[in-house]
Amino acid sequence: MPQPFDLVITGGETFTPMGLFPADVGIRGGRIVAIGNLGGADAARRIDARGLTVLPGIIDTQVHFREPGAEHKEDLATGTAAAAMGGVTTIFEMPNTKPLTLTEADLEEKLSRAAGRAHVDHAFFMGGSAANADRLRGLERLPGCCGVKVFMGSSTGDLLVEDEATLAAILANGVRRMAVHAEDEARLKERKHLVAGGAPPTMHPEWRDAETALIATRRLVGLARQARRKVHVLHITTADEMEFLAQHKDLVTVETTPQHLTLAAPECYERLGTYAQMNPPIRDARHREGLWRAIADGVVDVLGSDHAPHTREEKDKPYPDSPSGMPGVQTLVPLMLNHIAEGRLTLARFVDLMCSGPQRLYDISGKGRIALGYDGDLTLVDLKAKRRIENSWIVSKCGWTPFDGMQVTGWPIATVVRGQVVMQDDQLLGSPIGRPVRFMDCMPA
């Protein structure tokens, strides 16, 4: 007699490695064990997905959940709740917390804090700095670590590597793909006078101009090639960088964000003020179109939300004393589904950017596709649902989104993590069940 399933998703259009077609999905013991016609199968729980599209669980490889050290903005519980509400099943969290994530003990502290509080699966970046450059080869392979992150330009937090010698040492001490925030710190300092003493937020992309990003990206690629080290450049914002990076795809992978694909200067700064401020900045429509060309041409490998919340009180400070960053993990899926509805993106490319792309880049075990033996991570969406993004829907501790009031077509209906439904119909369900992500190139837990 066949074993019952823990969960069966029936009646949906399911995106498998063979494409999109009608298929049910059966999950048992946290893994996908059947794909096909399961209408009469015995199951502890069923979801009727008629009219819905069943996608592999969405993976957001860049979030800042602020814990430890700045829990008044966000913490691991509220950040992962926001992820689940937005249809995201897995997150990678950044190391610029207080204290910074620089040691094995720092990583273990984050993993301990996430245990029993995280609503989705998770991994943490180790920060790269002069303090730990000689130990990164071992640190990057610890269980629960997704890799090393380096800041070449100053942003939120104190993690900054601005000299080439330290950056070269970090590149030389490791083998996993290294994630980098590429802005040239020397040029940022040279141009700070443009906003010193106060300026309108429209000056943010003038101070942190396109050349600031291009200089750093060129330097990074040159050093990475010398070190023969794979690198992943985060939140690329300029058409110029995309044209350059297209020449180096043998070594470099590329991320951009929904914010940079959706907003454009100067309008967003005139409308939102400092709430549109992030690093690197939202730029003008020419650069935004360059990002879309790079997606169409295959230069972009993944999308990341760069979820970086601050309180309203902090964002209301006059520019440039206001902090850079905006929430995004909960709005990532609705924004990109809306771009699909408006013809800028295909569903297949979205799955490549948000599921299989992250799996390839980071050698994630058992995630990124709907296939037998893989984790039962699913994101169920209604591609035709017309909804309005509103601050009242946001469960992130900051309580706001720059997309408040935006009408979208496409909405996350359910989030399934290893066969457990953690969100359905805009409601969080059950207790937090998130676990550390497994990686094929890391030491076993």
Image (cartoon, rainbow, N blue to C red):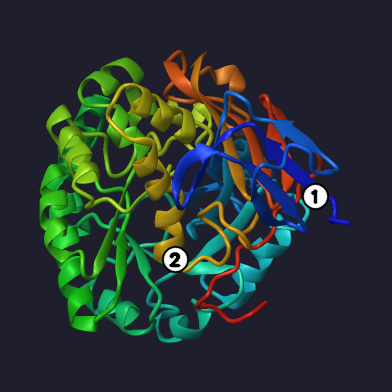
Query: In the shown orientation, is residue 87 left or right of residue 426?
Result: left
Mark 1 residue crowding within 10 angstroms, few (<14) / some (14–19) / many (20+): many
Would residue 190 be visible to someone looking at this image? no
Residue 441's disc is: none
Residue 362's disc is: 2
Establish if 122 lies above or below 219.
above
Establish if 6 lies above or below 177.
above
- Of mark 1 and mark 2, the one earlier in the sequence is 1
Mark 2 residue crowding within 10 angstroms, few (<14) / some (14–19) / many (20+): some
Establish if 437 lies above or below 378.
below
Q: Residue at x 34, y 27 (%)?
A: 339
In front of the other: 6 or 398: 6
Q: Quadrant of the C terminus?
A: bottom right
Circle 2: residue type: Tyr
Establish if 6 lies above or below 1.
above
User: Residue 130: x percent and y percent?
Assistant: 37, 77
| Secondary element at image label 1 | loop
Disc number lying in front (1 or 2)? 1
Residue 5's disc is: 1
Q: How much space separates mark 1 and mark 2, taking CA atoms?
A: 30 Å
Question: Based on the displayed image, in which of its 4 quarters is residue 296 positioned?
Answer: top left
